[in-house]
Amino acid sequence: MDRRALFRGGLLVTAGAAIGAAAATIPRVWPRNHLPFDGGYAPAADRVDDYDVQGRITATWHVETSEPVVAFTFDDGPGPKWTSEVLDALDHYQVPATFFLVGQNVAAHGDLLRGRLDRHEVGNHTWSHPDLATMDAPAVGKQLARAHDTIQAVTGRAPKLFRPPYGHIGGSTLMAADKAGYSLVLWSRKMNEDKYVQDPPGQAQDIVEHARPGQIILAHDVGPANRYVALSQLGAMFTGLRQRGFRFVTVSELIALGRPASDAG
């Protein structure tokens, strides 16, 4: 056999092996079973033109501010077990809060809110609390619109803030919320009731000691029994935070104080 042919063949084998090894380390641009590029619930750039996306939506986890302020938020209500007790505590300690309301709960228990929202703010938490990250934009839009209309009819207020259930956000969620003119609100601190089931005062201590200026704090006034661990300690939280020099605002008031931060704190 010609020596030059062997040499050329060796180069080809070596080069082929190198290419194969490199290919094995390069991630696939289109991994198998990826979500569809167009359509479905994932894309935030699908049908932008004909879906009338405005491009003005913001997302807030906390707010960068030097002022010692925090915003308490309560999700999933109203409900007959705890909403009134939460409102009583807020009244007693003169604390404003933001309630992210579920539309079907407002329809069923709206009387719990009437006349009790003077210092508080309402936000949209969808009609029936589905996982919006698995829904397309029209379906998300229906959830937001039905809840919006119900909240406005019962409370006399048109919500401007929106919190997705579970904090799950698909591209369709952003599109629908933007089209509806909402600002998206998440949180940077939440109650950890499971950790303090046997030590409710520990939950209050945790919130008080770890509070930072500009935090949005998440609690729930509807749900499983363990959530009462946090609700039973609201007075201790308010008192402890005031002793640290904090004051309380609604989410909209908090956003107005500073620049919305783009990462959780």
Image (spheres, rainbow, N blue to C red):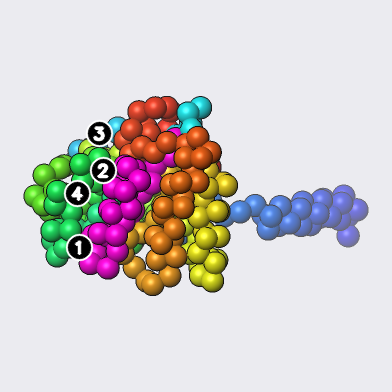
Q: Is residue 147 left or right of residue 216?
A: left
Magenta range is 69-97
Q: Which of marks 3 and 4 is in front?
A: 4
Q: Identify the residue position indicated by label 2 in the image.
A: 120
Residue 55: % across, % down: 30, 33
- Between the C-alphas of marks 2 and 1, the distance is 18 Å
- Between the C-alphas of marks 3 and 4, the distance is 34 Å
Q: In this view, does 187 lie to the left or right of 174?
A: right
Circles 2 and 4: CB atoms closer than 8 Å:
yes
Q: Is mark 4 on a helix, strand or loop?
A: loop
Q: Could you tell me the amino acid type at mark 3?
A: Gln
Mark 4 nearby-residue class (10 Å; few <14, some 14–19, many ≥20): some
Residue 87: % across, % down: 27, 53
Q: Identify the residue position indicated by label 3 in the image.
A: 54
* Near-viewer residue (255 or 19): 255
Quarter of the picture containing the N terminus is: bottom right
**Is residue 93 visible in this depiction of the protein?**
yes
Q: Could you tell me the amino acid type at mark 2?
A: His
Relative to residue 57, is residue 13 depicted above or below?
below
Q: Identify the residue position indicated by label 4 in the image.
A: 116
Q: For the view shown, which residue lies furthest in the left direction?
A: 153
Q: Identify the residue position indicated by label 1 in the image.
A: 105
Tell me the residue at 32%/42% (across/down).
94
